[in-house]
Image: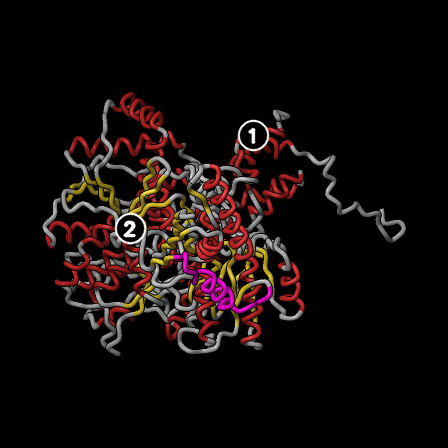
Amino acid sequence: MDKFGFTISKGRQIDYGSNDKRIAEYIFEKEPSFRLCIECGGCAATCTSGNFTGFSLREINILIKRGENDKVRQSLKKCMLCGKCTLVCPRGVNTRNIVVLAKKAFLKSDEYAI
Amino acid sequence: MNRDVIVIGGGTAGMEAAGQLAKAECKVTLIEKEEEAGGHVRNWCHLFPDRRNSADVVKYLSDLINQKNITFLKGTSVESINKSKKKFHIKTNRGHEMLSDAVVIATGFDLFKSEKKEEYGYGIYNNVITSADLEAMFRSGDLRKQNGEIPGRIGFVHCVGSRDEKSGNLYCSKLCCVTAVKQAIEIREHLPESKVFCFYMDMRMGGAHYEELYMQSQEKYAVNFIRGKVSEVGESINNGLIVKVEDTLAGRPLKMELDMLVLMAGMEMAEGGRKIAGMSGLNTGENRFFAAADNHFGSNISNIKGIFYAGTCTAPMNITETISHARASVTEVMDYLKESNI
Amino acid sequence: MNIEGKRHIWSDYQKEIADDHFFYVRSCIRQSFFPGSEQFFLNLMRNILGKDVYENPGHTTCTGIGYHSDIVPSATIMTVIARHFALMKESGYKNIAISCVTSFGLYTEILDTWKHFPEQLEKTREYLFKATGREFDIPENVAHSSDIIYKFKDLIAQKAKNLLINKITGEPLKIVEHIGCHYAKMFPKSGVGGAEFPHVLSGMIEAWGGNVVDYPERRHCCGFGFRQYLVQANRGYSVSNTAKKFSSMKPFKPDMVLTNCPGCTMFMDKWQYTIKEMEGTSFGDKGESIPVLTYEELAGLVLGYNPWDLGLQYHMVQSEPLLKKLGIEYDNADKFKTKDGKQMPIPQNLINS
């Protein structure tokens, strides 16, 4: 692998065309308020989990929409479903349901059910 | 010609409409609930985008309504509006009973009551103030914390009561972004040692010369911009204000201690306008402002023939737009009077 | 700080709290960790205030801990809570008094669910009837037991033997109040004073002569967070939240913390010991730790009851520094004796004593 002392990098670009957007589509269908997020970060600012872990619901929202699912799958486990984010969201996004639906969507995609 | 028009509301829109109607030889009664005409602009110090003295605008408007065809009723509010045939019957709290051929509603806006956003602590933490409170400080020339100290770090929270489902206001108040930038610049001029931070969701600098002002605030006045909605405010042992926000561009939660926090209160349909909507059968929209007959070519026209709208009783507007809208309402009134053979 | 601004908010969040005839439901963990609290609540209500408070021996856990750990499904917990309502109906009571904040949050959440989804209510009726043959009514009044003490706080103040004044300095005690998240954060209208500036505990502190400390992380969670605590590998998150909260209140040198939630009392008490062991940090004045009391314990001290009868010795952080400030006399020899005077084993590693 490091025969020559250097590597060939994968690009950093989000490959929007090839990325898997089934998770996003699944949530859009079940929870249309998912579309209303304006990435203001109110949720992440108030989040107890985000204080000590890298959890940010705002980031999860955008990553799912871009199909960058790998990071999301791990991150979702950090949510405690306390719902403080729902209390502050200026767009009335049903944030807690998005976490629940995203978890379901990952399970379903593993089973090729979506 | 002896055509009577009643204008309800003596702020920028009502004064402009009254003045132009009088020029067109209508007999105008201008009704204002406060003891003085001028509306919100009276409380402002300087105006965006060119930072002119707001007293200039008040003087222009006051001169305009100082005409023989205008009767100005101060400290007066409307109790009822009824239409029979082509005449409007209006009663006031001070016992006036008036007849008119047309009515212009110019009831304007109220500032969002910032104490409703409990998590920001307005009315509780001494140095949490509103944009209007800051203007009053600019007018007095004395920009201090409540204990008399000079503030070193000042924050602005954009979108307080605007674009916020929790406040019941989904719309953008449109003027707060540019007002925050203007006020941030003014703070830096008053207090060159200070540091100023604007917490915003989106910078909406869509008006003429707004973007230039924004750039100036960065380049010349070193105003800092942090993209994130403030989630809560607390008080430190030194009476500093601890602000919590996600720095969305850095992707991490952020806290900051400030000496003063300015809440950019949004615009809401005025209480007075809501009463009039209730008593007259005028339509209001989901945003509670009066609903105009057409968004493009009927923004002064109401659902009742002979009643017209001027200014921010229909939507948030800046002063330029308010004056244009008020002038347009006069065109509509004159067309109506002519077409109705009044 | 402008207290008028807070009063303005409080006036928007006044809830109706019944005056008498309560069906009392206990907490699972308070009886073990703060055993004097519920006992003193009953004593206060029945013998001092002359109220009718009834306990039904058939009452069980609400299963809240299981529910929040993803073990108990929602249909089950609804049926368990419906069974408590059935016991209440059978005993002829309409006002429920709930000792635990987790339970209170669940009762509130379930009642709200039933309001929005009446089919869930009908299903629950069916499950309960099939399983037990019981029927139930929705309570007329739902109060947390701290709501009830809040309601009678002025009566308690009239009978006070020890106001919350530092007898050494003559100054009011500086008290941190901490409300359980499930008391008002889910449904601000269900808590006295709302979620942002709750009044239920601060009202007691004011009425009994103390000063409330408003510090930056006042709204932050105590650190319990069921799943964070229940899984050992996650406990670091729990204790980190507690450390964050105590670090934020430390500069204010609070004399004590007052809580209304079993989890908060337990974790704010016991994690102080853990943090001290792990990092050597303590958060009170002069290297002491901060006593964490329940509202019943504090009411008991105010009314002049013996601290050992109130169970203060069963906390990890001992209350002696607080008792000295309050000028309360106590006998250390009695601290770990049973009612009939037998010596119990004395716990090791208690802090502040």
**Image point 46% across, 56% down: which residue?**
B19
Q: Was residue B134 drawn as part of the magenta stretch in this picture?
A: no
The kind of residue tagged 1 is Glu
Q: Secondary structure at mark 2?
A: strand
**How far across and down, in percent of the image, does residue B27 sit?**
40, 52
Q: Chain of mark 2?
A: B
Residue bearing mark 1: A29
- Label 1 with label 2: CB-CB less than 8 Å: no
Residue B104 lies, with reference to residue B234, above or below; the image says: above
Question: In front: B51, or C91?
Answer: B51
The kind of residue tagged 2 is Thr
The label shown at residue C141 is none
Whether residue C35 sits left or right of residue A69 in the image: it is: left
Question: In front: A58, or B31?
Answer: B31
Q: Was residue B67 drawn as part of the magenta stretch in this picture?
A: yes
Q: Say if residue B207 shows up in the picture.
A: yes
Q: Secondary structure at mark 1?
A: helix
**How far across and down, in percent of the image, does residue C309 sit?**
19, 59
What's drawn in magenta, residue-wise? B50-70
- In the rendered image, which quarter is residue C110 located in? top left
Residue bearing mark 2: B92
Q: Quadrant of the C terminus of chain C?
A: bottom left
**Image point 29% across, 68% down: which residue?**
C211
Whether residue C95 sits left or right of residue C233 in the image: it is: left
**Image point 27% across, 54% down: which residue?**
C11
**How far across and down, in percent of the image, does residue B33 sit?**
34, 57
Question: In front: A95, or B279?
Answer: B279
Q: Quadrant of the N terminus of chain C?
A: bottom left
Question: In front: C207, or B177?
Answer: B177
